[in-house]
Image: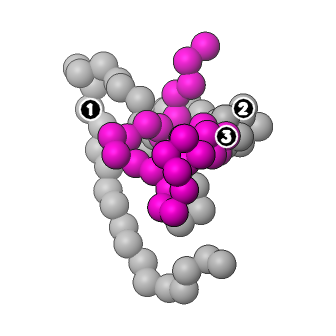
């Protein structure tokens, strides 16, 4: 099964200060770890649903949906301290 991840392959993405092969190996390991079912939330949408998440603490990935359906999204940004 091919690995599908929001932390997916991006052209020219790598980890600074690592040789390319080590960077690729580490990124592959991170992808495999973070995409385990125990870490994945898959939402089954219903009319009126509202989801809120913190992009500092997770990765998100939207899937395609039928073009005849409407999707309305709002983005909100709040100020505060970074999570450490």
Q: Residues within 10 Å of mark 3 (few under 14, many from 20)?
A: few
Q: Is label 2 in a helix, a strand or a loop?
A: helix
Mark 3 or 1, which is nearer the eye?
3
Q: Which mark is residue 84?
A: none
* Left or right of 38 on screen, residue 47: left
Q: Is label 1 in a helix, a strand or a loop?
A: loop
Please tell me in which quadrant of the rendered image residue 74 appears.
bottom left
Q: Which mark is residue 37?
A: 2
* Left or right of 8 on screen, residue 43: right
Q: Is label 3 in a helix, a strand or a loop?
A: helix
Quadrant of the frame with the N terminus: top right
Mark 1 or 2, which is nearer the eye?
2
Residue 45 visible here:
yes
Relative depth, front residue between 69 and 23: 23
Q: Which residue is at a point 55% across and 18% down the rendered structure image?
A: 2
Report the magenta residues as a range. 1-30
Q: Position of residue 66 (x, y in %)?
A: 30, 19
Q: Residue furthest front?
A: 19
Q: Residues within 10 Å of mark 2 (few under 14, many from 20)?
A: few
Q: Which residue is at a point 43% across and 84% down the rendered structure image?
A: 79
Residue that numbered label 3 is attached to: 29
Q: Residue furthest top?
A: 1
* C-alpha distance separating marks 3 and 1: 36 Å
Q: Which residue is at a point 54% across and 56% down the rendered structure image?
A: 18
Q: Which mark is residue 70?
A: 1
Quadrant of the frame with the C terminus: bottom right
Relative depth, front residue between 47 and 62: 62
For the residues labelled 2 and 3, say whether their Cβ atoms are less than 8 Å apart.
Answer: no
Q: Position of residue 46 (x, y in %)?
A: 49, 33
* C-alpha distance separating marks 2 and 3: 15 Å
């Amino acid at each position: 099964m091919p690995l599908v991840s929001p932390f997916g392959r991006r052209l020219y993405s790598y980890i600074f200060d690592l040789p390319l092969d080590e960077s690729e190996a580490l990124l592959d390991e991170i992808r495999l770890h973070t995409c385990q079912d125990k870490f994945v939330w898959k939402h089954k949408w219903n009319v009126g649903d509202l989801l809120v998440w913190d992009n500092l603490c997770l990765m998100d990935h939207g899937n395609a949906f039928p073009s005849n359906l409407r999707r309305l999204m709002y983005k909100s940004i709040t100020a505060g301290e970074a999570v450490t």
